[in-house]
Amino acid sequence: MSSSEAAAPRDRIPLAEPVIGGNALAYLRTCLETNFVSSVGPFVGRFEEAFAAAVGSRFAVACASGTAAIHLALRVLDVGPSDEVMVPTMTFVASANPVSYLGATPLLVDAEPRTYNLDPALVVDELDRRAAAGLRQPAAIEVVHLVGHPADLEPVLEAADRHGVPVVEDATEALGARYVGGALDGRHVGTLGRVGCFSFNGNKLITTGGGGMLVTDDEALARRARHLSTQARLPGPAYDHDEVGYNYRLTNVAAAIGLAQLEELPALLAGRHANAAAYDAAIAAMPGLRQAPREPWADPSFWLYTAALEPDRARVSRDDMLRHLAAEGIEARPIWTPLHRTRVLRDAPRLGGRIAEQIFEVAFSLPSSSNLDDERRRRVTDALATALAA
Ligand SMILES: *Cc1c(COP(=O)(O)O)cnc(C)c1O
């Protein structure tokens, strides 16, 4: 917890705070007692195995951050200078930065209004158009599962497969989210593309302080990602390296917390779903406000419960709503600024962007910690109702 959080008044309701319990302290004590604190240590392997099993992937590689996992994912798919990678414009900048690290160009794709995730029709049309015109395809498609709701992946996977373009899933915001019904029934986000990436940053569903995970069913990709994450050092006593690697391994200390957090995943997820049920029920009776996305084919994680004003019916603007909530000690925040509206990526090539801009004007995330109680959820919904009535 940062010092500003620690100094905040007791009744302030934060957006998303870590809930660390269970075996965390016992595992950390083991790290210190055995002196295994760095990335050589048994918790790293145990965390990887448990994580792969939890999401239903064959291999998992623990990384220093979610951003590092995305960087490694693109690197093992051989993305490089002069390549393009499709990235949704409605996401956190860490989805796109690794594309830039590799000297490649993010091609920003507009969102669709139902889930705020990238619009599959734009992806399919662009791949088909390029194929018909004999143009070069993007080197990869990065799909983000925003604020815990699965993206509409089936059409993207079908077109990507047809045109031989690999799909990377940025599932950093969506641990615990699955597909329901249809061909993807029961599948966990992050396990459907060639590579999936997760984050254990402080405000994500589970945290290691900072950390990430790369998952894949492809053994060669997993081996290469692990190799690159440890400076591409070859086995043996000599320090020999066969390519430019990174220091991207997760430490044993962080993995110890991660394993304990993963054991608590069902309970943490249940907390998110309890929040969603309470917010959904209250918002159903509030004209002018729309519930968080929940498509019939999706079982979202509700990492951040993200409501939206209905511009034609609400009399309050998003900023007035956020100001009202802040005055009540409630931390809420707008959904991500579309990347084509950020200074760093405003000149990036893009496919559309209007829908993302419209979503940005109206959508905002409510306090979503897994340990919120009824009383605090009611404070949030009461404040929403007062702001709408103002
Ligand atoms: C959190 C996040 C990341 C990066 O994760 P870190 O562990 O903070 O590096 C990447 N993409 C999205 C969409 C995120 O929300």
Image: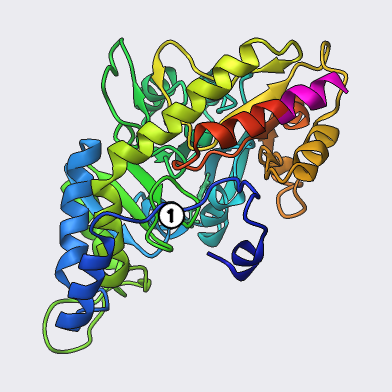
Q: Is residue 114 left or right of residue 159?
A: right
Name the residue at 28% across, 13% down. 183
Mark 1 beta carbon near ligand 1 (under 8 Å): yes
Quadrant where the C terminus is found in the figure: top right
Q: Quadrant of residue 321?
A: top right
Q: How many marks?
A: 1
Residue lying at the far bottom in this picture: please name it. Answer: 238
243 in magenta: no
Name the residue at 64% across, 50% down. 11
The residues colored magenta run 383-390
Q: Quadrant of residue 153?
A: top left
Residue 289 vs residue 168, the one in the foreground? 289
Q: Is 386 rendered above or below residue 170?
A: above
Can you give x and y, in whole percent of width and height, for residue 273 in the image? 43, 28
Q: Is 163 rendered above or below residue 170?
A: above
388 in magenta: yes
Q: In the rendered image, is residue 354 in sight?
A: no
Label 1 secondary element: helix
The three-letter amino acid code for the residue at tag 1 is: Gly
Residue 289 vs residue 164, the one in the foreground? 289
> Which residue is the site of mark 1?
66
